[in-house]
Amino acid sequence: MKNKKTKFILLMLSILLLTGCTKNLKNSENKIVTNEKTGQSVTENIICRPTDEDMLKIYEDNNVDISKLPECKDFTPITDYEGLWTSFFVKPLAWVILKIGSLVKNNGLAIIITCLLIRCALIPVTRKTAMQSEMMKKAQPELERLEKKYAGKETTEDQQRKAQEMMMIYQKYKINPISGCLLAIIQLPLLFAFLEAINRTPAIFENKFLVFEMGTTVPKGIASGNYWYIILIILILGTTYLSFRKTLKDQSLSQQGGQMKFTLYFMLVIIALASFTLPTALGLYWIASSTFTIVQNLLVERKKK
């Protein structure tokens, strides 16, 4: 079942990557254009016009006509249809961030608020997934005995009997294999849409949140003498690890725990590397989302006691 889950999630990722993505601006030499001041890779398919003079000059120098785009403060999601992904996921999310940003007078804070609102809306789904995970842990000893019982038996008849007995175990513990993927099915499109909405909305990067420039990458921030960016990296890695810790603990009890733990640690390394190349705005989203997961896990653990 876990293999089927993995294949399903990979399929969802492939669909999302094919249906919509941020397009980096490239120069005449086919190299990605970066803002030398902030270190940020420049997005070509933005959904509204920037006001920053440096950014406007970059688009002009690379022959990208953005004159027909609305200013970000006037942006509405009801514009020309650009496909299901952009029109129904990316643009509405970008509009929500901008509207909240205009209310709280800061787009960095707007990213955090929007992220938390989405995570709150997903609590019923998260709760159901957590319940299924608990039932799966209870069923694990019986599933392991079943695997041992049919180890080395590869005939069609044996595999059919194994499948039938497995379904009986699922029914006994009220486990629905599909609901285990439900959170991933909902969260993955929202995650990709959120990240793309941020990347394609220049106004978000023109703001400042506390001591951080929203469009500045960590290396550029540190190079400019702002060592608070080191704290930002620590927060990203720390909150990511703590949000994964419950999963690591749960997986240590299962047969496939070692493989899953390796996957999670590998993800930590990838996130660490990405943290050095992505602008602060995306880091804020990740910290907010991971912190929500940490608090949620703590509440679940306390409820068990």
Image (tube, rainbow, N blue to C red):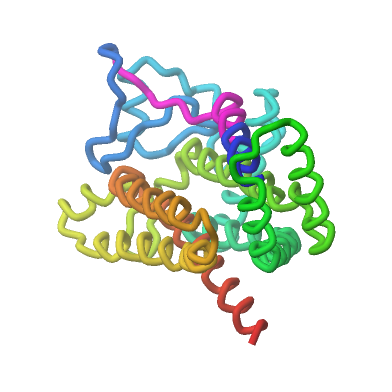
Give 124 or 54, whichever is nearer the viewer.
Answer: 124
* Residue 246 at x, y percent in the picture: 52, 68
The one of 109 and 116 positioned closer to us in this rendering: 116
Relative image position of residue 141 (x, y in whole percent): 64, 64
x, y (%) of residue 77?
A: 67, 36
Q: Position of residue 247 (x, y in %)?
A: 52, 63
In front of the other: 248 or 113: 248
Residue 304 image-quadrant placement: bottom right
Q: Considering depth in this image, is 254 or 155 the residue closer to the camera?
A: 155
Can you say which quadrant of the picture contains the N terminus? top right
As drawn, 107 above or below 74: below
Q: Residue at 30% of width from left, 19% of height from top?
A: 61
Q: Provide the residue span drawn in magenta.
A: 13-27
Magenta-drawn stretch contains 19: yes
Identify whether 251 is placed above or below 164: below
Q: Quick one: which residue is furthest to the bottom in this view?
A: 305
Vertical relation: 30 (above or below) 104: above
Q: Residue 95: in sight, yes or no?
A: no
Q: In this view, which residue lies farthest toward the top?
A: 28
Place residue 8 in its image quadrant: top right
Does 236 lie within the magenta span?
no
Residue at (60, 45) in percent of width and height: 151
Is residue 243 shown left or right of residue 27?
Answer: right
Q: Is residue 32 visible?
A: yes
